[in-house]
Image (tube, rainbow, N blue to C red):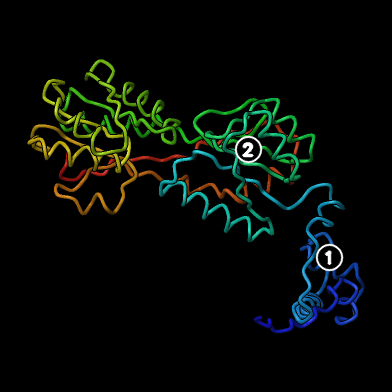
Amino acid sequence: MIQLPEQPAEGPVPTSADVARLAGVSRATVSYVLNNNAAVRISDPTRRRVRDAAAELGYVPHAAARSLRAGHSRMVLLPIGGFPAGPLHHRFLHELESGLRRLDYTVVQYGSLGLDADDAARAWAELRPVAVIAPGSVPLTPQGTAVLRRSGAKAVITLGPQPVAGAHALIMDQRKVGHCAVSHLLERGRRRIGVVMPGEPGPALFAGPRLTGARQAAEGRARIVPLPLRHDEESAAALAARWRTLGLDAVFAHDDIHAMLLMRALQDAGIDIPGETAVVGADDLMLGRLLRPRLSSVRMGLDTELSLADLVDRLVRRPGKEPERHDLLRARAVHRESS
């Protein structure tokens, strides 16, 4: 029989009273310092002494107890589920999380796949977040917004192409992407333009608005043909095999991944790019610049004048205001050899 080494017994969990004794201050001062309470003036040396004592003892505040006292947590809940994980999404998350951490919030991502609108809102409310930022891929209704507010959420914010009644809205208007891509192709003299419509559920939230934007740009100037395409080589090869029967001279391929997939299939079918067909993607991935011909793309970014974390903090500190709407998405075409 293998004898496991005896584990040392753990000592008692340190408390705020222990920190107060070591730092020579009151428990209230410990609470003010470690909870970043800006309403009470405490000298910098005292703050350092409290933090040093807490570090020495290994003490951290009890989040659940702090939430119970305040009636809410410092948690900003970000439900996830079917949201396309492109570079813009990662940039958004990085900016939001780093900014909120600076303001003493914690961003928690919450899996919401399989939940309908009402169940999702109730599940989020159970965690008592101080704010919820719901992407358009996760359902939120006016009723769900009301449930979250009654549970103590100071700010309910949607992130997607359309606002929800009663909630603040961070609009990512995907029509701009389709409009930008097709405008670029029109400038290059293309008039018969296909628009790839991905067959997977993830990009579906963006596909419809991007097609609408493409049609708005082409109105009265070009023909737009929606092209269903699954994300696999067989689907791309089948589309390429009938390409010349479609009579198209350009394609906006929804994103760079679908653009690269289709461009390879078109080249295998003997279609010259860009001579016979111009190709434009979206996301401006580095991999697209390594192809030959290099891939033209729509580069997307966020409004740099708006600090997302400061916006969330302001909405939390001033609840009850009329819902705000902010247009975040910026888009521009980057011309390369494929168009």
Q: Identify the disc placed on residue 157.
A: 2
- Name the residue located 65 percent from the left edge and 46 percent from the top edge: 77
Quarter holding the C terminus? top left
Please give left or right for residue 202 compared with residue 296 in the image: right
* Circle 2 crowding by C-alpha within 10 Å: few under 14, some 14–19, many from 20: many
N-terminal label among 1 and 2 = 1
User: Residue tagged by mark 1?
Assistant: 32
Amino acid marked by disc 2: Ile
Residue 28: image x %, image y %?
90, 67
**Looking at the image, is 304 positioned above or below residue 238?**
below
Residue 61: image x %, image y %?
79, 65
Please give left or right for residue 56 compared with residue 136 in the image: right
- Name the residue located 32 percent from the left edge and 21 percent from the top edge: 215
Distance Cα–Cα, label 1 vs label 2: 29 Å
Quarter holding the N terminus? bottom right
Please give left or right for residue 12 compared with residue 98 in the image: right
Instruction: Kindly indicate the quadrant of the structure image that contains residue 257.
Output: top left
Amino acid marked by disc 1: Tyr
- Name the residue located 14 percent from the left edge and 49 percent from the top edge: 292
The secondary structure type at the circle numbered 1 is: helix
The secondary structure type at the circle numbered 2 is: strand
- Name the residue located 29 percent from the left edge and 22 percent from the top edge: 226
